Amino acid sequence: MNLIFDFLTSPYNEYSSLDIIFEIIAVLMGLLSVWYAKQDKIWVYPSGMISTAIYVYLLLKAGLLGDFFINAYYFIMSIYGWVFWTQRKEGLVIHQIDKMSLTEKKWSFYLFILSISFVGGVYGLVGKWDSWSAPIDTITTAFFFVGMWLMARKKIAHWIFWIIGDIISVPLYLYKGLALTSFQYLIFTLIAIFGYIEWKKVYNNNRQTV
């Protein structure tokens, strides 16, 4: 038990108290954001933006470039999603939970390939491609990039991309010395599974109503 505790906490011996507090806040806001996403609440975006803004700082400081780009991208897509989710016509919300169109499937594929190329290229430029975690980090980033874009457009399939990326991230963040964040992604996985079920239910109910 002590070995496990030491493994989880030893990386924090080199962190400042302020950075540890920042990570705790980022984790809590991240969990709250995913919970709001499950509930189809617009608060997913302000809470998520607080979390990602903190992670942009922490990950850039730690030199974790793939994760840094993920969170910088999240922040930008959160602005887009916030606008998309709140669009109204004659007082009614325009965009409802839906499945991907053929065009969105094509763009998801293009975004996935572009994300792998971009993050992989960045790792190559800074000389970090020799790390065993770099290819895994690159692929995980691509899953999250597509998942975030689909969430911003209220597509059910975004949960599948989140689930895959979250599962990969649990051991990856343990390896990187961010135990709190690893635990966060474990909870993310569980919420994402329930979120997928919940959004499917809402989608089916909306279809029956129509």
Image (cartoon, rainbow, N blue to C red):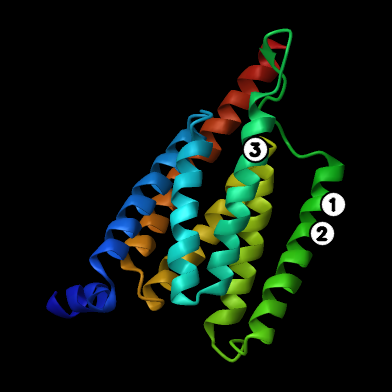
Q: Look at label 3 and name its amino acid.
A: Gly
Q: Residue 81 carries which label?
A: 3
Residue at image coords 53%, 29% = 42
Q: Residue 106 carries which label?
A: 1
> Could you tell me if residue 72 is visible in this image?
yes
**Marks 2 and 3: CB-CB under 8 Å?**
no
Of the 4 image quadrants, the one containing the N terminus is bottom left
Q: Nearer the viewer, residue 37 or 209?
A: 37
Mark 1 or mark 3: name the one nearer the start of the chain: 3
> Could you tell me if residue 156 is visible in this image?
no
Secondary structure beneath dot 3 equals: helix
Secondary structure beneath dot 1 equals: helix
Secondary structure beneath dot 2 equals: helix
In space, the residues marked 2 and 3 are separated at their CA atoms by 19 Å
Q: Look at label 1 and name its amino acid.
A: Lys
In space, the residues marked 1 and 2 are separated at their CA atoms by 6 Å
**Marks 1 and 3: CB-CB under 8 Å?**
no
Q: Which residue has dot 2 on it?
A: 110
Q: In this view, does 164 lie above or below 179?
A: above
Q: Is residue 157 left or right of residue 183?
A: right
Residue at image coords 82%, 59% = 110
**Marks 1 and 2: CB-CB under 8 Å?**
yes
The residue sitting at the left extreme is 2
Q: Look at label 2 and name its amino acid.
A: Tyr
